[in-house]
Image (spheres, rainbow, N blue to C red):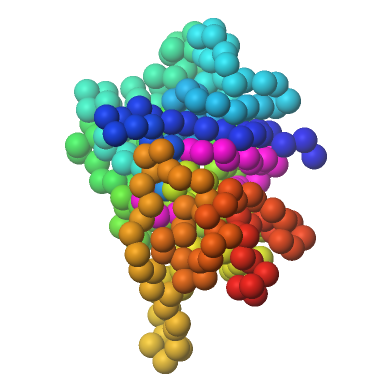
Amino acid sequence: MEPIIQVEDLKKYFKTPSGMCHAVDGVSLSIERGKTVGIVGESGCGKSTLGRTMIHLTESTEGKIVFNGEDITRVGKHKLRQLREKMQIIFQDPFSSLNPRMTAYETIQEPLRISGKFTKKEMEEKTVSLMRMVGINKRIENSYPHELDGGRRQRIVIARALALNPELVICDEPVSALDVSIQAQILNLLQDLQETMKLTYVFITHDMSVVRYLSQYICVMYLGQVVECCPTEQLFERPLHPYTRALLSAIPVPDIHVPKKRVILKGEVTSPIDPKPGCRFFARCPYAGEDCKKEQVLTEAEKDHFVMCSRIREIG
C-alpha cells in the first residue's frame, strides 16, 4: 500500500543567540494510510515540531515531504490552502487553541465558512452533524470556551479539525491536559472516528501507555532524531535502544508486588544548539563507548526494527 505521507531527512532548525537549535535533525518516516504512528519522547525532543513541520505549520529547513505521492516540500499559498483540508492538527491545550470570542457552534462552523464550498443550509447541517459525531450536546452550542470543561473543549477542537474531511490528522498530545477519566473518553472517540472516517493519525505523546493503546507503529525521538522505530508490540517486548529501555522502565505498575527494575539516567542532556557529531544520548548512556562519538545512523537491527546505536550488538 502506498504511504499517505513520507518525510525524508527532514530538518527544522531555529536560529538562537547561541547558534542553531536542531529541533528536528534528519528524520525519515513513512506512514501507511489508515494507521496510527506514535511519536514518543521526553519534553523538548522535537516531536511536536516534527508534526507541525510535516503539515507546514512551520516550514522545514531541509528535507523532503511527500503527501499522497506528491512532493509538497515547498508549496505556494494556494496549494497550501488546498492541503489544509487534507492535513489537520489537534492541539495539546484545547483552551488556548480556541478563540475565546467564538461559541462552540461558530468554532466548528468556521472551517466550512472559510472554505467557501457550502451554502448556509449545508453549513448548518454539517455543523450539527459534527457536534453529534464528537458527542457535543446541542445545549452547549452557544457556550464559550471558558464556560466548558477540558473534555468538551477538546471535542470542539476535534470537530473543527474534522470539518473538511481530512485524511491525515496530527494529534499533538491531545489528552495530556485532561483528567484521566476524560482521557479515556477522548481516546475512544479518536479510535471510533478513525474507523468511521478512515483517518490516518500521527499521535504525539510522552505517555507510553497511551501510545501502546492507540498505535500500530512507534518512533522514539531523542533531541531531534529518531533513535528507534518498529511495530508497537515489538518495541514493548524487546526494546533495543538504551533510551527506549529507560522510557519503558518508567511506566508505573499498579501491582506493588511485581518487582520493577528502573533505569535511572545520569549525566546532563546534550544541548540541541549546534550539537557535535555522534550519539546525542552519549552523556547519559550507561553503555557509551568511543565508537559512540562517531556519526550514528538508523539501521535495521532486526526485521522491521530500526535503531540508531552503534553498540547494539554489545548491549544485547
Closer to the camera in the image, 12 or 190:
12
Residue 182 relative to residue 277: left or right: left
- Location of the C terminus (image quadrant): bottom right
- Location of the N terminus (image quadrant): top right
Q: Position of residue 44 (x, y in %)?
A: 37, 47
Does 27 appear in magenta? yes
Q: Vertically, is 167 above or below 232?
A: above
- Looking at the image, can residue 128 be seen? no
Q: Residue at x 55, y 43 (%)?
A: 202
Q: Vertically, is 44 above or below 2?
A: below
Q: Residue at x 59, y 68 (%)?
A: 239
- Looking at the image, can residue 299 be seen? yes
Q: Position of residue 315 (x, y in %)?
A: 60, 73
Hey, which quadrant is residue 92 in on the image? Answer: top left
Q: Residue at x 45, y 88 (%)?
A: 259
Residue 140 relative to residue 294: left or right: left
Which residues are the magenta region?
A: 24-44
Q: Residue at the front extreme? A: 290
